[in-house]
Amino acid sequence: MKQRRPRVVAERKDAGKVAKRVWRGLIRFNLETAGPFRYSRTVLTARSETGAIVGGLVMQSWWKESFVELLWLAKHARRHGMGSELIAEAERRARRRGSKLMHLSTYSFQAPRFYEKHGFRCIGKVSGSPEGESRFYYVKRL
């Protein structure tokens, strides 16, 4: 009996549960192909004198790489070196865990020059989303 070709379905019911199943499939494949991830997540914050969070950085690491998921500072906390301190601490932690590179993306209206100042090299650009803007992809060898 001939097996039918799979079909594409947009999941509406239990989409979260289905997404976890798909993730498990990819993780299993990656482990079989490239070995243990050594996954970790690092969350760094910038805090005011009162302890309020005025910014932070979230980084995910696996194998020999670290990915800066996001870096944010409140408007009043910018231009005081906090972004530089956050990215430097993230880089120290990435090196300590054995990462050989860091990568991230940022939009043209966010901070491309900031990352270039810190040694990141642009490896790609996608334009038009949002309208009139671009998304840049950066990497830094550690």
Image (spheres, rainbow, N blue to C red):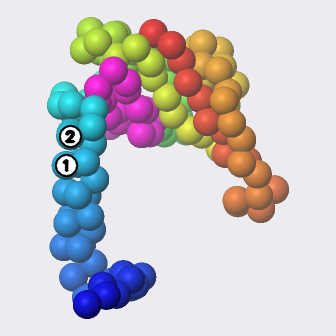
Residue matched to label 2: 32
Q: On the picture, is 39 further left or further right than 126?
A: left
Depicted 7 relative to depicted 114: above or below: below
Q: Which residues are magenta?
A: 53-71
Verify whether residue 117 appears in magenta.
no
Residue matched to label 1: 28
Residue 84: image tag: none
Residue 10, percent across and down?
40, 84
Q: On the picture, is 133 further left or further right than 135?
A: right
- From where the camera sits, is residue 32 visible? yes
Crowding near the residue tagged with mark 1, few <14, some 14–19, many ≥20 C-alpha atoms within 10 Å: few
Q: Foreground: 2 or 70?
A: 2
Q: On the picture, is 14 further left or further right than 108?
A: left
Q: Foreground: 9 or 123?
A: 9
| Residue at x 56% of width, y 38% of height | 105
Q: On the picture, is 60 further left or further right than 102?
A: left
* Spatial CA span between label 1 and label 2: 6 Å
| Residue at x 23% of width, y 73% of height | 18
CB atoms of marks 1 and 2 within 8 Å: yes
Residue 69, percent across and down?
42, 39
Q: Quadrant of residue 8?
A: bottom left
Residue 32, percent across and down?
20, 40
